[in-house]
Amino acid sequence: MPTKIDSPTWIALACVLLGWFGLNTLVATFGPAVHVAHFYDLPVVMQDPRWLLTGVEDGFPLARLAFGFVCLVAVSAPLLPRLGYPRVPYLLGAAPFLLMLLCGIVLYVKSSSTHIEAGAGLGRWGGYLAKWANGATGWGTDVVARHIEIGAGGYLAFIASGYLAVRGILRPRQAAAVSATSVD
């Protein structure tokens, strides 16, 4: 049975939409050059984090469009239990939060992993060179990471999706408690 969707839920959903599609999720500032990435740009950035340095611009429209659709599905998921689809209400309420968490983990792993391996035929010296190159890459990554910040859209959407996740977890428990006391 459908239930009325309250104002705080609508406000949180609007904040998630604004954070994902309207505001910047990641901002890379290198002197006068500023490159921004919206949340729907993250598949491009996750595929190759170097795009934060050069800017995503208008490349990869199909990946951005497909991920934008996934984002819209994730934003609409917290509404489904209230519209009469009570399957796994905990997970549906937390869908935007889980999507942001998954994207953050993938981006962190992708951008912090070592990129240079020694070939099998290079021997001990190849191993030393690869170790030195990975150290230099790690230092360079640390320098670049100081210039990349989470934008206002990332913070806004994270807080709002966290609210939706907590609300999605607590709402079914509250409804079960109310129905259990009304039966007694």
Image (cartoon, grey):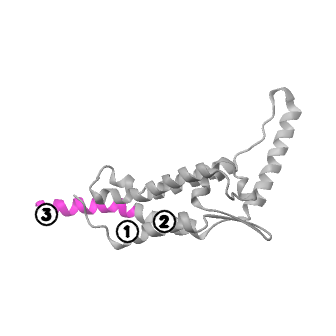
Q: Residue furthest left?
A: 184
Please identify, in this view, whether the residue under mark 3 or under mark 1 is nearer the observer.
Answer: 1
Q: Is residue 104 above or below residue 154?
A: above
The residue pinned by badge 3 equals: 182
Mark found first going from the N terminus, 3 or 1: 1
Query: Contact, CB < 8 Å: mark 3 with mark 2?
Result: no
Q: Which residue is mark 1?
A: 9
| Viewer-side residue, 75 vs 145 | 75
* Label 3: how many Cα within 10 Å (few below 14, some 14–19, many 20+): few
Q: Identify the mark nearer the N-term, 1 or 2.
A: 1
Q: Is residue 62 magenta?
A: no
Q: Amino acid at mark 3?
A: Ser
| Circle 1 SS class | helix
**Label 3, label 1: how many angstroms apart (C-alpha)?**
26 Å
Pointer 2: what residue? 16
In x, y percent, where is residue 129? 87, 39
What's under tag 1, amino acid-wise? Thr
Which corner quadrant of the image does residue 144 belong to?
A: bottom right
- How many discs mark residues in the rendered view? 3
Q: Residue at x 36, y 54 (%)?
A: 90
Q: Which residues are magenta?
A: 166-184
**76 shown above or below 120:** below
The structure residue drawn at horizontal position 83% and vertical position 45%, both measured from the top left corner, is 133
